Amino acid sequence: MVEGRLSVEAYARACLDRVAAREPVVQAWSYIDPKRVIAQARALDDAGPSGPLHGLPVGVKDVLLTRDMPTQYNSPIYEGYAPAVDAACVQTLRAAGALIFGKTQTVEFASTGRPAPTRNPRNLAHTPGGSSSGSAAAVADRHIPLALGTQTGGSMIRPASFCGVWAIKPTWNIVSTEGAKRFSTTLDTIGWFGRSAQDLRLLYDVMDPEPATVADAFELCGARIAVCRTPVWASADPATRDALSAAEQRLGAAGAMVELLELPAPFDRLNALQDVVMRGEGRSAFLSDYRTDAARLHPSIRDHVENAQGYSRAMLCEAYDIAAQCRVAFDAMAGAFDAVVTPSTIGTAPEGLAQTGALTFNAMWTLLHTPCVNVPGFTGEGGMPVGLTVTGPRFADRKVMAAAAALGAEFIR
Amino acid sequence: MVEGRLSVEAYARACLDRVAAREPVVQAWSYIDPKRVIAQARALDDAGPSGPLHGLPVGVKDVLLTRDMPTQYNSPIYEGYAPAVDAACVQTLRAAGALIFGKTQTVEFASTGRPAPTRNPRNLAHTPGGSSSGSAAAVADRHIPLALGTQTGGSMIRPASFCGVWAIKPTWNIVSTEGAKRFSTTLDTIGWFGRSAQDLRLLYDVMDPEPATVADAFELCGARIAVCRTPVWASADPATRDALSAAEQRLGAAGAMVELLELPAPFDRLNALQDVVMRGEGRSAFLSDYRTDAARLHPSIRDHVENAQGYSRAMLCEAYDIAAQCRVAFDAMAGAFDAVVTPSTIGTAPEGLAQTGALTFNAMWTLLHTPCVNVPGFTGEGGMPVGLTVTGPRFADRKVMAAAAALGAEFIR
C-alpha cells in the first residue's frame, strides 16, 4: 500500500484528514489520537522499511488489547481501561511494521450487548452491521485501508456485506485470540476488513505461520464452483437472492462450472447448535465480569451467565460433537470444488442503529471453522450493498482468497 | 479454610512464615511480596466476609495475568512485565474473596522451554514435575492451601502426582483461559492444586457457573469403577503398576465393582495426535513473540513456530477430527461407570531439575477434554509419591471429585 515515494507520515495524515472530515457522522472510532498516529508514523519513517506492512495504518476493534491505547469493549465497566499489553495479533502487526491507527467501535464485548454508535457510510440511517461495526465502517469509508475485527456469530462477514467491503474470517485458530475479549472459545475468530482481496492477502501472509503453496492458485475459467444456498435459504431477501442468481450467471459466463451444493442433515441443525455453543461458552467467558460487576453488564450478557436459554451441558456436548462431524463432512464436500459461494447476509443493512442484523447466514460457517471471505459488488434496495461469501475447507484460506479475488472481478461492475 | 476466629492476616502470616522457612530450598515462587500479601489480608479483614473463598490464599502460576504483580512466564522476553490486568480466573477468585498470594514458577510459557528452578519438596534432588512446578510444590510444601495451574499436555496432573498433592484439571473450557498465555487453544486448561478433594471442590464451585445437582453424589460401596490402563500401559514403572494394583484391591475390598476398561482403536493414536494439536496450534500461539524477539525464545518454542516436526494442516485436521470422535466414544464408555481410574504418571518424579517428566499418561485426557483429578496416596522408590487419576465423561467434574474423595480415603493410609 505504501510506496517508497510516499512517507508513512504523509499517508497517515491523509487518513487522519479523512477521519476528521467523516468521523462526526460515521462514528467509527472509540479511540483515536492524531498526535499518537503522527508520532508512530514518524518513528516508522525514521526506522525505515521494517516489514511487509511498513507504515500501513490498521484499525483495531476495541475488544483487542493495545498496549498504548485504551481497550474499553463498549462496556461501562471498562471505561478508561488501558492495560499496557497487546493482543497477540496486534503484536504481530507491529512486528510487521503496521501503524496501529486507533480503536474501532464494537457492540459491547463483541457479544449481544449495547450496539456501537457507528453508522453505515453508504447510508447513515442504516446500521453498518456488528459487532465489528467501526472496523467495517472505517474501511468502507476510506479512513484506513485495513482493520481488525472478530467473529463469533457473524461479526465480520455481516458488517462487510452491509458496508460493501472485503473481509476475511480465517480458519479458526490460525490467528491466536490471545488478548481478545473472550466470548466463545470454539467460535471466536480474528479477522480483518480491507478494500481488496489483495489487501486481505497482504495481512493474511503476516498472520499465518504456514507459507503459501502452489495449491493456493485459482483459475476461474474451468473452475468447479459450488453454490450453497444453505438450509436457511428461505430467510434470504430478494437482494441476496438476486445477487446469488447474478453470481451464478456471471460465473457461468466466465467459463466456470457452477453446481448447487445441498447440505444434508444434520447441517440444518448447525445454526441452532452455534447458539448453544456461543451461549454455553459465554457462561464461562463472562463469569468473571458477572461476579465483579453484574449491574453494569448488559442484561443480555447477564443472560449468558445465568443460562437464560436453559441450555444443558449435554446439549453443549451434542453441539460440539455434531459440529465436529459436520466439519469432516463439509471439508470433504467442499474439497470436491474449487470454491463454494454462499450468501453473506439475509439482504442489505436494516434501517436504524439499534439492531445490527442477523447472523443467519454466518453462524454455520463460524461453527464449521471454515475460511470465509465477503466479496462485495452487488446492491439491493436503495443501492445498499450486499455481499456474497466464498468459503472452502478448513485451512484453504489462500485458495479461498484467490477464488474470491477472481469472483470479485466478475461481481464488481 | 479460614474460620471466623482466625483473621485473614493471621492466616496469611502463617503462610508467609512457611514460605520464609522453605522458599530458599524449594523455590516455588517467581514473585511474592509479603507487604502486598499483608495489605491484601488487612483489606479483606476490614471488608469482612465477602465470598466463599474469603481470605483464602491462592498461588497463581506465572502464565496467568495479575493486575498487581508481574507476569513473567519464565521468559527473558517478559522480565519485569507487569500489565495491570487480571486473567479471568484470577478476577473470579478475587470476586470470591480469595487472597492472591503471589506468582508461582513455571516452565517457560507453560510450554517446552526452560524449566522452573523449583525443587520437589518431598526430595529436593527431584523435579516437582512441570509445567505448573511452583504451584504444585507450594501446595505440597504447605506454603498455601490452593494454587492455580494450567495443563496443555500434563502440566497439572504430573506435578500433582510427583509432589503428592491433589489437583483437578476440569473439563476443557469450563474455566475461561482469557488472560492465560496461549499455547494450544484446543488443549489449554486452567486447573488448581489443593490439599484435599474438599478444597478442590471449594474452588471449583466458584469457577463453574453451573450449579451442583444430585447426580454429583458418589457412594463407593456398590460403585462400578473402571480401571483404564490406557494404550500406553507398557510405559508404566513399577511404582505406577503397584499403585494401580493396590487401588484395584482396596476398591474391591471396599465393596466397589472393579472392571478393566480397554480403549479400542483409534484411542491408541491419541497421544501422537495430542502432539500434533499442541505443536500445530503452538505455531500460531507463539508467532507474535517469534516475530518480535525470536532470539530470546527457547529453541524448542521457536521449533513450534517453525514447525520443526513437519506437521501439516491436514494432519492437524485429522487430529481434531479423531479427537472429536473419541470424545463421543469415551463419554459413552465412561458414562457406564461411576468413575474411571487411570495412572497419573509413568512413576515417581525423576531425579534432577532439567526434565520435568513425561506427559505419557496425561496427553490423551487433555485432548479428550475430560475432568481429571489426581488422587495422591501411593509411594514408589525412595518413598516418593505417585498418584492415580480419576476421570469421567466431559462435564462430570463434580461426580469425578466426589469419586476422587472416596477413592482417596482408601488410597491415603
Image (spheres, coloured by chain):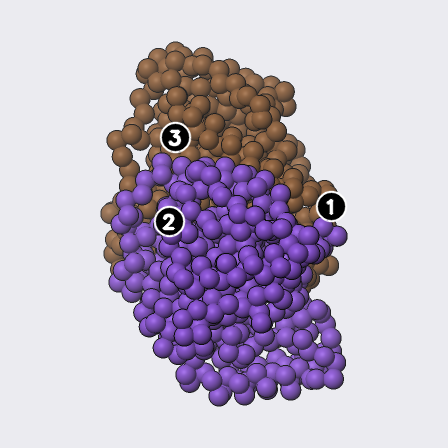
Chain colours: A purple, B brown
The image quadrant where one finds the N terminus of chain A is bottom right
Q: Which residue is mark 1?
A: B308
Left-right relation of A192 to A264:
right
Residue kind at label 2, given as amino acid type: Asp
- Protein chain holding label 3: B
* Mark 2 → mark 3, Cα distance in angstroms: 28 Å
Q: Nearer the viewer, mark 1 or mark 2?
A: 2
Q: How far from the left and from the top, in percent, is residue A288?
A: 36, 55
Mark 1: few/some/many CA within 10 Å (<14, 14-19, 20+): few
Label 2 and label 3 in one chain: no
Q: Is residue B159 visible?
A: no
Q: Which mark is residue B400?
A: 3
Q: Is residue A8 visible?
A: yes
Nearest to N terminus: mark 3 or mark 1: 1
* Label 3 CA crowd tier, 10 Å (few <14, some 14–19, many 20+): many
Residue A205's place in the image compared with A39, above or below, is: above
Amino acid bearing label 1: Ala
Q: Chain of mark 2?
A: A
**Badge 3 element:** helix
Position of residue A389 relative to residue B163, above or below, is below
Residue at 25% of width from left, 56% of height from top? B48
Gap in angstroms between the C-alphas marked 1 and 2: 38 Å
Q: Is residue A217 above or below residue A269?
A: below
Kindly indicate whether the residue at mark 1 contacts the one at mark 3 (C-beta within 8 angstroms): no
Q: Is residue B336 above or below residue B96?
A: above
Report the disc number at residue A275.
2
